[in-house]
Amino acid sequence: MSTTAAVPPRAGGRSARPARPGSEVGLAVLLLGGLAAAVVLRTAVGGAGVARSPVAGLLFAGVLVALAAIARPQWLPRPARTSPLRGLAYGLAGAVVLCLPALASRWDAGTLAARPGDAFFNWAAVVAVVAIAEEWFLRGVLHRLLEPRGTVVALLVPAGAFAALHLPLYGLAALPLDLAVGIWLGALRIVAGRWSAPAVAHVVADWAAWFIA
């Protein structure tokens, strides 16, 4: 009689991979290295106008999606399922919080940003793709890899990476703000139990910035 413990099947009849103690940290380090390479590639393609380059943004998003898809930690226990509506609700509430400072400033000035409306939709599509790719990578895969090391680690490491990846776009002066936004998005991931919550908040806040930033 075999003494090997049976691996419980997953939903759909597939068996989970056996646990690999410590391997999630090594994989997280490799992912962060891949993120750094993706940032360098984005900067090289976008040049001085990297923040406004849709080609550079989409290439960056594609690299992040590929890395996240390859590195998904199938051997880790799946988190408890929460309602998709919960992720949506927390995401929308989180976007409101992100927009409040800029909205208050514009409200005091009595004006919104004057930008051509016909250019919004193409820009919004690119922004959504990039934001969703970043959130799946950072608050989805990387967060899950780091979660066994504690909630604080899973919160702060992706937040730091989020701030760092925006350095070529907005410069060192924006680093504290980007770090605060990264921590907020990570908190949404934790309380909602889904990476869709920070993804919704990120996309909606970026879209709103077209009118209020």
Image (tube, rainbow, N blue to C red):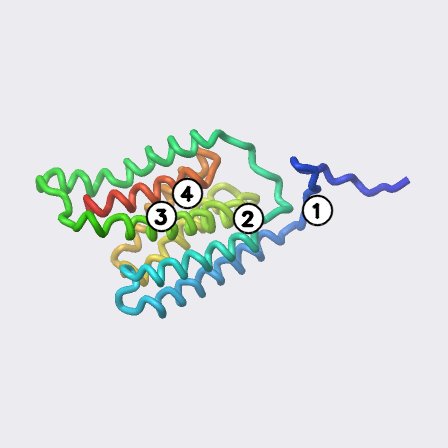
Q: Is residue 23 above or below residue 14?
A: below
* Mark 4 closeness class: few <14, some 14–19, many ≥20 residues within 10 Å: many
Residue corresponding to mark 1: 18
Separation of marks 4 and 3 at Cα, in angstroms: 18 Å
Tell me which amino acid carries mark 3.
Ala
Identified at 56% across, 54% down, the residue is 71
Looking at the picture, which amino acid does disc 4 mark? Answer: Gly
Q: Amino acid at mark 2?
A: Leu
Whether the residues at callouts 1 and 3 have beta carbons within 8 Å, the answer is no
Marks 1 and 2, the one that precedes in the sequence:
1
Contact, mark 4 vs mark 3 (Cβ under 8 Å): no
**Separation of residues labelled 1 and 3 (CA atoms):** 35 Å
Q: Nearer the viewer, mark 2 or mark 3?
A: 3
Q: Identity of the amino acid at label 1? A: Pro
- Quarter of the image with the N terminus is top right
Q: Which residue is mark 2?
A: 145
SS for tag 2? Answer: helix
Q: Which residue is mark 4?
A: 186
Residue 33 x/y as whole percent: 49, 62
Name the element at disc 4: helix
Residue 77 lies, in percent from the top left, at 62, 40
Q: Seen from this angle, which residue lies furthest front? A: 118
User: Along the polypeptide, which appears first: circle 2 or circle 3?
Assistant: 3
Element marked by disc 1: loop
The residue wearing badge 3 is 128
CA neighbours of label 1 inside 10 A, class few (<14), some (14 to 19), many (20+): few
Q: Are discs 4 and 1 less than 8 Å apart at CB? A: no
Of the residues under marks 4 and 2, which one precedes in the sequence? 2
Q: Which mark is residue 207?
A: none
Q: Position of residue 53 (x, y in %)?
A: 30, 62
Residue displayed at 29% across by 46% down: 206
Q: Quadrant of residue 174?
A: bottom left
